[in-house]
Every structure is written in C-alpha cells, then in structure tokens.
Image: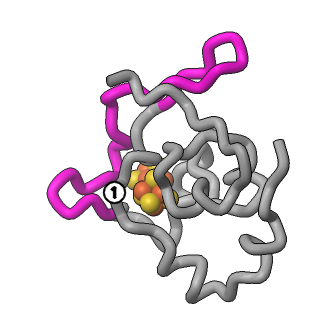
Amino acid sequence: MKTSKLKLESLSTEQWEKLCKCCARCCYEKIDFEGRIFYTRIPCDQLDLETHLCRIYADRDRVRNDCQRLSPEIVAAGILPADCPYAELVEDYQGPSLGE
Ligand code: SF4
Ligand code: SF4
C-alpha cells in the first residue's frame, strides 16, 4: 500500500487532532478474520454514545491497553473506515468491512 505518510507525518499535533470528525466509528470492537478486519456493533465501554466522545481520552492508552493512539503507521494499517479523514490521506486505502 502506498501511503501519503509525508502528509500525515508533517501535521502538527493540533492539525492532527482537528482532522478527527468525532464520528466514533473507530471506537467499536473489531474482529480480525483471516487477516481481514470487520467492525462489530459493540462500542467500547469508554465511549459516550450520546456525545460520541471518549470518557478517558487523555489517558486512553494507559487505562485501556487495547486502545492505541493513532499514528501514521496505524492509519496505514487499514483499520479505519475509508471515509475517515486520516484514511483519506492514504493512497489506495483499503478500509475494513463495516458490517452493515
Ligand atoms: S473514524 Fe476517524 S474521524 Fe471517526 S472518530 Fe475515528 S479517527 Fe475520528
Ligand atoms: S478508550 Fe476511548 S478512544 Fe479508545 S476505543 Fe475506547 S472510547 Fe475509543
């Protein structure tokens, strides 16, 4: 997969955070089936379903060790929905199945 890593890596922390449109879809449990990622309808227990915000955002990777902070490498790995603004900066992005 070719990536626009330069675009992602050149963003400041503020620009990086602003890219997120807080749809919260990446905060739903995922299943890896034979190398393909599938989204489930099961939200993370730290997700506020009304606001779509994480209740422990600042400490998320410390409190939940299965929650990883996004990085250019994680974006390029293909776990985000294809219309996520981070994924849209990756060329030829192959998004997971959203199970819909
Ligand atoms: S899918 Fe993308 S835009 Fe939506 S919450 Fe996750 S990182 Fe933000
Ligand atoms: S800990 Fe927060 S950011 Fe991480 S998956 Fe759960 S709700 Fe989302």
The image shows residue 65 at horizontal and vertical percentages of: 61, 48
The image shows residue 97 at horizontal and vertical percentages of: 49, 26
User: In the orientation shown, which residue stands out farthest toward the top?
Assistant: 34
- Residue at label 1? 23
Q: Nearer the viewer, residue 88 or 78?
A: 88
Residue 78 horizontal side relative to residue 46, left or right: right
- Where is the N terminus found, in terms of image quarters? top right
Q: With respect to residue 29, does 3 lie above or below? A: below
Classify residue 50 by image quadrant.
bottom left
Q: With respect to residue 17, does 71 lie above or below? A: above
Q: With respect to residue 40, does 24 lie above or below? A: below
User: Does the magenta portion include 15?
Assistant: no
Q: Residue at x 58, y 85 (%)?
A: 15
Q: Which residues are magenta?
A: 30-53
* Rendering quadrant holding ligand 1: bottom left
Count up the numbered dots: 1
Q: Residue at x 38, y 42 (%)?
A: 44
- Disc 1, SS: loop
Q: With respect to residue 63, does 59 lie above or below? A: below
